[in-house]
Amino acid sequence: MFRPVLTAGAAVALMAAASFAPSSASSEGVPPPDRVVIDVVAVNGSGCPAGTAAVAVAPDNTAFTVTYSKYLAQVGVGAKPTDFRKNCQLGLNVHVPQGFTYAVAKADYRGFAHLESGASGMERASYYFQGMSQTTSVSHRFTGPYSDDWETTDVTGAAELVYAPCGVSRILNVNTELRVGAGSSDPASTTSFMAMDSTDGSVSTVYHFAWKECP
């Protein structure tokens, strides 16, 4: 196995983000000055077993991160038949200061992959508000040979931003998926995998807020 930084337990919790790096992404509007709090109300999926995902809000309210510790899709030696696909569905209750609403303007996904020659990998993600139309899932594909860190970015244009309704509590659903296919590689003698996890919190998915004031 060629996996350099993977698997460790981490409680699903809202964490104080003292080590959260300042967001470099531009955002619409000015973030609210009061603290934003996120409660994790639902966690489902083979990529985020109980106790293996954590959420933290940036101190400047420009973004929040999701950190996983057991998010690994793989095929080949040592893999179970169901391991080729892993997914995670998070339900987040974002408590926004009065008079503000938000949208997700940008999302950065990172991890590590080892794909044998002929193998392939895919990362897919979407996010939407409870009771509202789901946003289109965005997929990113990788082909072997590949053995390195990977990073993808999904950006929503200003005109396409979907804001949470003002004055109404709506759960933000965040869905992600990793998938690996053996292709023409030999799964009897090789292992290909794609991971989106970290032992030390240094590899996180980052969701950048766009803010606006409510009427």
Image (cartoon, grey):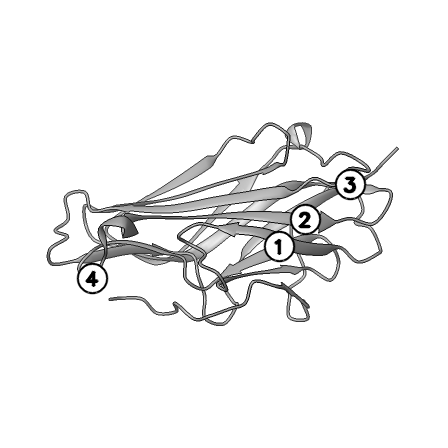
Q: Secondary structure at mark 1?
A: strand
Residue that carries the numbered disc 3 in the rendered image: 101
Residue that carries the numbered disc 2 in the rendered image: 93
Residue 1 vertical position relative to residue 81 in the rendered view, above or below: below
Q: Residue at x 88, y 32 (%)?
A: 215
Q: CA distance from mark 1 to mark 2?
A: 6 Å
Q: Residue at x 73, y 62 (%)?
A: 59
Image side of residue 126 versus residue 186, left or right: right
Q: Residue at x 11, y 58 (%)?
A: 189
Q: CA distance from mark 1 to mark 4?
A: 32 Å
Residue that carries the numbered disc 4 in the rendered image: 78
Q: Earlier in the sequence, mark 3 or mark 2?
A: 2
* Crowd rating for badge 1 (residues with CA inside 10 Å; few <14, some 14–19, many 20+): some
Residue 131: % across, % down: 64, 31
Q: Amino acid at mark 3?
A: Thr
Q: Tell me whether circle 4 and circle 2 mark residues in contact (CB < 8 Å).
A: no
Q: Amino acid at mark 2?
A: Asn
Q: Tell me whether circle 1 and circle 3 mark residues in contact (CB < 8 Å).
A: no
Q: CA distance from mark 4 to mark 2?
A: 37 Å
Q: CA distance from mark 4 to mark 3?
A: 46 Å
Quadrant where the image shows the N terminus? bottom left
Residue that carries the numbered disc 1 in the rendered image: 40
The one nearer the camera, 22 or 63, is 63
Q: Secondary structure at mark 4?
A: loop
